[in-house]
C-alpha cells in the first residue's frame, strides 16, 4: 500500500463506507434490473425466463462506475450543502442515471406513477428501452440530465457552459475514456483557460478510465501513469488518482479524493474572490482520474471468457437466456449478489439507510434546477431597435454593413443584461472579423491565460468567448442555454458544418424535451452565419459551403428556423426576434461587407413578421397579374435580383415584373409541414399559379425545390444558387460563376417570357456582351467593372421613357 | 544565453547560415510580391500604385515561418538525401508554399509558363488570388501539397495517414497554433500510438507558435513553458524547442533542432527494425516547437500599432494604399528590405547560391511523388466475388447479414494485398460491431500502446485502425489515399455527420484536383455507413440520422456516389466496384442484422450495373402498364415494400404492381446533372408517366423529391422515409413511426389507386387493425409480432386464388 493509499485508508468510518456501499449496491441492482427484468423486480421468486425481457438492450459496462461516482457526490453534497449537478459523458449509462434519480426520489417526483415500492420498481424496470417506455441514454426524460451522451464528445464543454456565471455551482463531469478520444473532448479540456473563479462556478472533471470501448481498449487507459499525468498537467489540471477494484478501499480513496478536490476548489474560489489578479494566478483546477473495472461487480466470466474488467461488459454481458439456462442462473446470482432483500424493505422501497445518504430537495442532483434550466431562465432586457436602425430616404439610398449594425445592437443587449450576467457571445476567433466589434466597447474576450501589454480586449471578465474550436463554442453555448441563460454564436458559414452533428443532437434534445412536461423551455440557440459563400475573396473554394441550412432542414420542423435578412434593418428585427424565442434553433445568414439597404425599420418589421412579401416599390406589375416573378432570399441574391429588375425596367419597360423577397425560409414550406408555412392560397397569390418564377437563393438551389415541390406553380420555379463553382475571385464573379448574377437573371427572364421577341433578343445580346466584358475586365484589372462597383438602384428607372437597348457595353 | 542555446550557436558555419538566410529572404520576397504586386516584380523601378493589386488578398502572418521551416527542411534533405514531404497546416500561407516550390523549380516544372525569370515572376505574382489565377491556400494546384488547410484541423491526421506503410518517408507537418485549438487536431496527436516504426515512416510535427489567430492570441502560446512541455510529453512526444526572433540565432537553433530530431527518428527506426518488441518500447517520437513572431520580417509597426509579432500581421498588414502614400512607401521599404537585387540575377532568376540550397529532382518537396499519390498508386488485387456470394434458390429464400458477408470479402482483399501493404480499414471502434469481424482472421487492430494477456486482435502490424475519433479515422484515410493507397471507412450512420466538414473539404479537393493535369487520380474514399437509422434498438433517437447523404449530394455530382444495396450480394458487387474506382467518394449504406436476400450474385451484378431496375419476380404487372409503382431504396425499405407487395398480391390480386429497386441513388437524377442519371425516357419507362409511385426510401423523404423534381411523373411520387420519429423501440416499430411499414404502404397504395373500392376498403380496415395490433403487442411483449418476425416472401402468393380479405387480424 502506498503512502497515499495508507493515508486515505481510514478516511471514512466503517459505517460511512457501508452506507455508501449499500447505496451503490442498490443503484447497481436497479441498473441490472432495468436492463433485464420484465417482472419479479425484487427477485422474491426464483428467476424464470418469463421475468426477463425478450430483447436485452442497454449498456452495463459504464453503469457501476457512474453510480459509484453518484454515491460519492451525494456524500459531498450532504456534507457541504453543495450545489452540484452531474454531467454524464457516457450517456449510454442511462439506466444508472435513472437508478440514482429513483433512489434519491427525484424520479418519482417527476414521474409519480413510478413509485418507490415494488409496483413502481416493476414499472421502472419494464419501461427501460421498452416500446412505449424510456430511451436507453441520459436523454431529456432523465431528471438531472443536460447531456444525453448519445453521441460522445460534448460532456466537458457542456459542463463549462453550465458553470459560467454560476459562481456557486459545482459541475461534476464524468468523461468516459472512450469519449476522451474524440476531437471535441480532446480540445474541451482547454476550457479551463476561460473559467474565471471570481464570477464562474467550478467544473470538476472525473476522467473515468474503465479501460474499454465497444471492443477495444482505450488509449488513455493504456499509456504509462506518468504520461497520463503529464497530459493533464499540460492541459492545466492537477489530477488526483483513484485506482483499484476493491470496493471498500475504493470508497475510501474516492471519498478522500473528492474531499481534497472540493477543498482545492474552495480555496481557489476563496482566494480569487478576496483578492485576485487573474492573469498572474490562473488556477490549476483539480480533476479526478478514476480507474475502475468496466462492468464492475458484474459477472467475472461468461462462457469462460473474461467479462468484468473487459470490453465484453460493454452492453449486455449475459444474453441468449432463452437458449441458455446457465446464463439465466448467472443472471439470478448476479442480481442476488447485491442482496436486494437488504436494500429494499417489505414494500420494495429503498431502506432508510439508503434514503438517508441522499441529499434533500433541490440539492438532489436529479432535482437541481440548473439541470432544468428553463426554471431559472429570465428573459433578456432588450433595447429598442430604433437607435440602431439604418435610416434611409428610399430603397437603395445608402449602404451599410449588416453585421456591424447588428454588433451595435448586441453591444447594448450585452450592456442591458450585464447585471443579470446571463448573456454571452461565442465564436471561433471571428467576432471582430464578422464585424461585431462594437461589443468590445462594453466587454472583453474572456481570457484567463497570460496577457501582454499590446493585447486588446482580453480580460478575465469578458463575455465574448473565442476559441478556434467550433465544437467548444457550440458546447459552451449549449451548456449555458441548458442551464437557463442566453447566447449567440457567430461563425463563418462554411465551417459551421464542423458542428453539424452537435447541431443534430441539440435539435433532437429540444424535440424530445418539448414532450416532457416538467422540462421548462430554454432559450433558443441562435447562429449568425456570416463570412458567407458569396464573400470569400481571401479564401476561396474551401470557404464556400452554404449547406448547413440543408442539415438543419432535416430536423423537426418546429425546432428549426432559417432567416435570410436582405439588409441591416431586417437583420436587426430578426436578431431582436430570435433573442426572445425559446426551444428553437435559429439560423440567421447575413454578410458583412457594405451593401445597399432596402427597408426602413418599420418596413423591415412588417416584412419579417410576414416572413416574405412582394416588394411593390421594385415591382412593375402595376396592379395586374405579373408576367414574371423574380424571387430572392439572401442579401447577395437580393442585390442581384434588384439589379436585374433595374435592367428590365430600363430595357423592357412593359414587362410586368413582381419582386418577392423571402426572409423566413420556412414560409415556403407547406403549412402542414411547418408552423410558419404559407397556406397554398397565399402562396399562389404571391408566386402566381402559372407565371415563371426566377428564384435567386443564397444556398444550394435544390433547397428551394425541396421546400416548394408541392406548390401549384412549382414546375415554373427556376432556381439559381450556389452550384459548387468558386475560387478566390471577385464577389461579382462568384455570382457569375454560379449563374446568379444580374445579367444571367435577365437572360433567364427573357428565356421564360420572350424567347423570340426581337427587342428582348437585343437585350439578350447585351447581357451576353456584359458577361464577356466582365470576364475580360476582371482578368485584366483584378476587380469588378466600375458599373458593378458603382451600381445603384434607380427608383424611377421604370417610369422614365425606356432607353433603346444597345449591343455595345456601357 | 542558456546552455542549450550556447551549444547550438555554432551549429552551422557562418556561410551555411547566410545560405539559408538568403534563401529565406527570397521566399519571403516572393510571398510579399504575390500578395501585393501586379507589376514591377523585381522592384527595379520605384514602386507606384499602378504596380499594386487593386484588391489585396492573402495571409502574410504565417508565411515567413512556413518558409523558414521549408528552408531548413531543404538543408536536411540535401544533407541526408531524405525522402520528405511537407504538410502545411496553416494552408492560408499558400503564397509561401508557392514561393518555395518556385524557388526549388517544382513550380516551373508543373507550370512551364511561370518561368524563373522576371517575366515568370511577374506571372507568379499576378496570378495569386487574382481572377483567372490561383487560389490563396495550399490547394491542389500547389506542387507538394496534400493538405489544403483551408479548414483547419486535419494536417496531423493527414500526416500520419501519409506515413503509414511508407517506411522511408518522413512527413514534416507544420501545425499552426490556431489549428492546434481545433478538436480534430487536439486528438490527432494520439496518432503516435498507431505508428509502427518497423513498417511505417515517421511524422515530424512542428508546432508553430506564432502566437496569434485572426484577432486573438493562441492558447498554446500563452501557457507557461512547463505546461506546454508537459502537454506534449503527455501526448507521447519529446519536444525540442526553438524560440526567438533574431534570424541568425534562430537559424542555428532550428538547424540543431532538426539534426537532433532526425537523429532521434533514425535511431528509433534503426532500433525497431533490428530487434524490437513494439509493446515494450513504444517510441517517444521527437517534435519541434517553433516559437517565432507572426509576420516575422514584416513591418514592425503600421500607423503606430504593433504589427510584426502580433495579430495585425494575420492577413495584409498594409492596406488602403491608394489613399495612403505612406503605406505604399512602407511596402516598398519592406520589399527592398529583403534585397531583391541580391536574390535574383539580371534576368530575374534566383541566384546560384539559392538554387544550390534546394534538393534536386523528386527529392524536392514540391516534386516528391508521395505528394501526388496517384503517381504511386497500384490497383488492388481483387478476389473473385463468387466465393462470398450468398446462394439462394429464389428471392427471399434465405437470410444473411450483409456486412458480415462483406467482411469476409474485405478479409480476402486484405490478404490478397498484404505484400503490397496498400490497404487499410479505419473505423471508430466499430469494425466488429459493424460485423466486419472476419477481417481479424488475417490482421489485427493496429495498437502500439500497452497490451494485456486478455486482449484480442491487437498488434503493431494490424491493418485495421480504430480510434474513437471519426475525425482521426477520416484524416488518416485521406492522408493514406492522397499518397496513393486504398482504404475503407466503416461508421455508424448517425455519427458520420461528425466529419461532414472533412467530407466537404475532401470532395472539394477532388473536384479541384481533377482539373489539374499533373495530379494523378487517387483511390476513392469509400464509406460503409451502417448501424443505420432503422436498426438502433440499443441507442434510439440520438443514433438516428440518415442525413449524411444530403450533405454529400450538395457536392459536385461527379465526385459523389451513393449506393443503397438491398441485400448481401448487391453489397458485395458494390464493394467490389467502389474499391476499383478513383477520384470519388463512394457512400455505401447497408445494415448489419440478418435480413432476407433477394438477388443471386449474377442478378446483383446486372442490377448494380444498371443502378436501378424493375424486379419482375416481385411485380404483378404482367406485361401491361402497372396500376401503381412501389419503388424502394435501402435494405429495410426494400423489405417493407416487398412485404406490402405480398399483402397486395394476396388481397388485391388484380392490382398490377410494379416493384422498382434503386441501388444507385444517382440514377434518379437528370442525366445532365449526374453521369449516372437516367435519361428522361428511361425514367418514364421505369416509373411511368402517370401512375402513382409509392417510394420507400432509407433516408429523409425530400431527398427523393430533390433528385426527381424535374421528372415527368414527379407529382405522383409519394415518398416515405425517416421523418425524425424514433426512440429505443423495436425495428418494425421504427418503420411504423415513420409510415414506412408494410401496412402503411398498403394504405398509401389504396389511397392512390382505389380509395372508394369496397374490396380495398376491407383491406384498409385490415391494415388499420394490424397497426393497432402492432401497437398493443409491442407494448405488452416488448418485441415485434410473430407475423413480423417470421414473415417470409411467398413467391407464388399472387398466383394462388386470392383469399378473401378479413377484418380480423391473423
Image (cartoon, coloured by chain):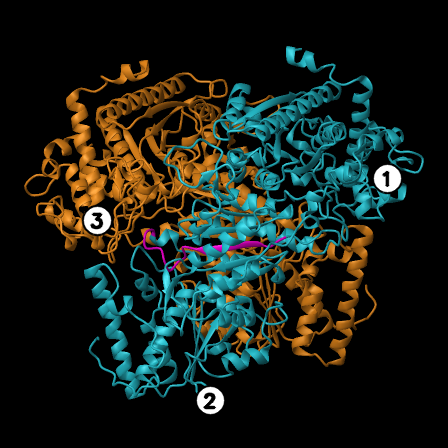
Chain colours: A cyan, B orange
Instruction: Label 3: state its secondary structure.
Output: helix
Would you name the residue on which mark 1 appears? Answer: A41
Q: Nearer the viewer, residue B343 or A84?
A: A84
- Tag 1 subunit: A
Would you name the residue on which mark 3 appears? Answer: B36
Is A651 placed above or below A561 here?
Answer: below
Q: Earlier in the sequence, mark 1 or mark 2?
A: 1
Residue B68 on the magenta span: no
- Tag 2 subunit: A
Seen from this angle, which residue lies furthest left?
A: B346
Q: Nearer the viewer, residue A500 or A341?
A: A500
Residues tagged by mark 1 and mark 3 found on one chain of the structure? no
Residue at position x 47%, y 18% from top? Answer: B281
> Residue B476 appears at what percent x and percent y?
43, 38
- Tag 3 subunit: B
Instruction: Label 1: state its secondary structure.
Output: loop
Instruction: Label 2: state its secondary structure.
Output: loop
- Magenta span covers which residues? A523-539
Give the alpha-carbon distance from disc 1 to disc 3, as whole Å.
77 Å
**Structural crowding at the residue carrying mark 3, measured as other residues with C-alpha within 10 Å and reported as few (<14), some (14–19) or many (≥20):** many
Residue at position x 66%, y 50% from top? Answer: A377
In the picture, the quarter occupied by the C terminus of chain A is: bottom left
Residue A531 on the magenta span: yes
> Residue A353 appears at what percent x and percent y?
86, 29
Would you name the residue on which mark 2 appears? Answer: A624
Q: Is residue B652 left or right of A395 when viewed as pictured?
A: right
Give the alpha-carbon distance from disc 1 to disc 2, as whole Å.
75 Å
Visible in this render: residue B105? no
Q: Is residue A206 left or right of A740 when viewed as pictured?
A: right
Amino acid at each position: 500500500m502506498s503512502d497515499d493509499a495508507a493515508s486515505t485508508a481510514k478516511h471514512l468510518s466503517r459505517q460511512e463506507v457501508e452506507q455508501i456501499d449499500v447505496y451503490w449496491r442498490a443503484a447497481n441492482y436497479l441498473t441490472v434490473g432495468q436492463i433485464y427484468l420484465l417482472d419479479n423486480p425484487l427477485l422474491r421468486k426464483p428467476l424464470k425466463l418469463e421475468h426477463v425481457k425478450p430483447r436485452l438492450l442497454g449498456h452495463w459496462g459504464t453503469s457501476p462506475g457512474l453510480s459509484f461516482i453518484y454515491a460519492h457526490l451525494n456524500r459531498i453534497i450532504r456534507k457541504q450543502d453543495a450545489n452540484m449537478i452531474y454531467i454524464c459523458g457516457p450517456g449510454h449509462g442511462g439506466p444508472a442515471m435513472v437508478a440514482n434519480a429513483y433512489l434519491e426520489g427525484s424520479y418519482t417526483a417527476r414521474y409519480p406513477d413510478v413509485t418507490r415500492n415494488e409496483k413502481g420498481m416493476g414499472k421502472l424496470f419494464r419501461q427501460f428501452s421498452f416500446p412505449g417506455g424510456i430511451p436507453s441514454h441520459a436523454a431529456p426524460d432523465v431528471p438531472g440530465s443536460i447531456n444525453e451522451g448519445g453521441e460522445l464528445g460534448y460532456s466537458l464543454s457542456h459542463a463549462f457552459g453550465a458553470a459560467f456565471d454560476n459562481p456557486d455551482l459545482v459541475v461534476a463531469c464524468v468523461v468516459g475514456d472512450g469519449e476522451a478520444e474524440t476531437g471535441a473532448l480532446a480540445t474541451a479540456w482547454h476550457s479551463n483557460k476561460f473559467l474565471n473563479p471570481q464570477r464562474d462556478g467550478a467544473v470538476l472533471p472525473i476522467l473515468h478510465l474503465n479501460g474499454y470501448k465497444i471492443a477495444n481498449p482505450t488509449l488513455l487507459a493504456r499509456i504509462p501513469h506518468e504520461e497520463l499525468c503529464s497530459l493533464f498537467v499540460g492541459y492545466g489540471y492537477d489530477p488526483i488518482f483513484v485506482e483499484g477494484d476493491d470496493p471498500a478501499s475504493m470508497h475510501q480513496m474516492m471519498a478522500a479524493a473528492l474531499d481534497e478536490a472540493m477543498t482545492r476548489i474552495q480555496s481557489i474560489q476563496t482566494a480569487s474572490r478576496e483578492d485576485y489578479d487573474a492573469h498572474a494566478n490562473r488556477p490549476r483546477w483539480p480533476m479526478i482520474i478514476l480507474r475502475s473495472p468496466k462492468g464492475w461487480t458484474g459477472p467475472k466470466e461468461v462462457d469462460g471468457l473474461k467479462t468484468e474488467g473487459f470490453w465484453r461488459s460493454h452492453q449486455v454481458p449475459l444474453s441468449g437466456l432463452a437458449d441458455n439456462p446457465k446464463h439465466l442462473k448467472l443472471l439470478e446470482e448476479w442480481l442476488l449478489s447485491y442482496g436486494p432483500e437488504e436494500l429494499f424493505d417489505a414494500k420494495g422501497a429503498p431502506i432508510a439507510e439508503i434514503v438517508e445518504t441522499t441529499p434533500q430537495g433541490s440539492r438532489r442532483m436529479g432535482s437541481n434546477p440548473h439541470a432544468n434550466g428553463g426554471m431559472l431562465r429570465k428573459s433578456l432586457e432588450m433595447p429598442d431597435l430604433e437607435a440602431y436602425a439604418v435610416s434611409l430616404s428610399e430603397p437603395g439610398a445608402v449602404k451599410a454593413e449588416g453585421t456591424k449594425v447588428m454588433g451595435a445592437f448586441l453591444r447594448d443587449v450585452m450592456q442591458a443584461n450585464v447585471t443579470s450576467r446571463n448573456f454571452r457571445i461565442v465564436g471561433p476567433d471571428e467576432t471582430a472579423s464578422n464585424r461585431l466589434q462594437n461589443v468590445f466597447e462594453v466587454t472583453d474576450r474572456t481570457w484567463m491565460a497570460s496577457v501582454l501589454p499590446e493585447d486588446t480586449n482580453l480580460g478575465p471578465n469578458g463575455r465574448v468567448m473565442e476559441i478556434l474550436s467550433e465544437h467548444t463554442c457550440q458546447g459552451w453555448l449549449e451548456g449555458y442555454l441548458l442551464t437557463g441563460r442566453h447566447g449567440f454564436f457567430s461563425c463563418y458559414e462554411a465551417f459551421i458544418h464542423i458542428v453539424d452533428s452537435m447541431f443534430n443532437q441539440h435539435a433532437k434534445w429540444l424535440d424530445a424535451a418539448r414532450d416532457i412536461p416538467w422540462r421548462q423551455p430554454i432559450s433558443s440557440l441562435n447562429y449568425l452565419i456570416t463570412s458567407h459563400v458569396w464573400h470569400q475573396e481571401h479564401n476561396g473554394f474551401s470557404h464556400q459551403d452554404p449547406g448547413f441550412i440543408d442539415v438543419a432542414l432535416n430536423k423537426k420542423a418546429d425546432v428549426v428556423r432559417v432567416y435570410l435578412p436582405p439588409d441591416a434593418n431586417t437583420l436587426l428585427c430578426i436578431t431582436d426576434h430570435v433573442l426572445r424565442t425559446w426551444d428553437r434553433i435559429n439560423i440567421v445568414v447575413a454578410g458583412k461587407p457594405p451593401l445597399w439597404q432596402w427597408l426602413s425599420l418599420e418596413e423591415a418589421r412588417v416584412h419579417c413578421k410576414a416572413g416574405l412579401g412582394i416588394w411593390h416599390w421594385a415591382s412593375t406589375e402595376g396592379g395586374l397579374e405579373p408576367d414574371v416573378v423574380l424571387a430572392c432570399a439572401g442579401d447577395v441574391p437580393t442585390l442581384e435580383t434588384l439589379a436585374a429588375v433595374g435592367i428590365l425596367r430600363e430595357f423592357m419597360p412593359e414587362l410586368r415584373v413582381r419582386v418577392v423577397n423571402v426572409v423566413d425560409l420556412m414560409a415556403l414550406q407547406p403549412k402542414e409541414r411547418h408552423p410558419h408555412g404559407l397556406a397554398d392560397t397565399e402562396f399562389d397569390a404571391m408566386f402566381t399559379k402559372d407565371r415563371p418564377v426566377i428564384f435567386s437563393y443564397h444556398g444550394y438551389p435544390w433547397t428551394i425545390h425541396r421546400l416548394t415541390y408541392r406548390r401549384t406553380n412549382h414546375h415554373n420555379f427556376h432556381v439559381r444558387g450556389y452550384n459548387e463553382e468558386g475560387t478566390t475571385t471577385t464577389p461579382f464573379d462568384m455570382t457569375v460563376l454560379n449563374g446568379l448574377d444580374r445579367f444571367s437573371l435577365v437572360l433567364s427572364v427573357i428565356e421564360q417570357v420572350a424567347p423570340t421577341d426581337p427587342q428582348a433578343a437585343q437585350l439578350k445580346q447585351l447581357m451576353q456582351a456584359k458577361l464577356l466584358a466582365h470576364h475580360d475586365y476582371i482578368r485584366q484589372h483584378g476587380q469588378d467593372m466600375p458599373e458593378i462597383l458603382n451600381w445603384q438602384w434607380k427608383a424611377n428607372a421604370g417610369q422614365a421613357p425606356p432607353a433603346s437597348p444597345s449591343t455595345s457595353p456601357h
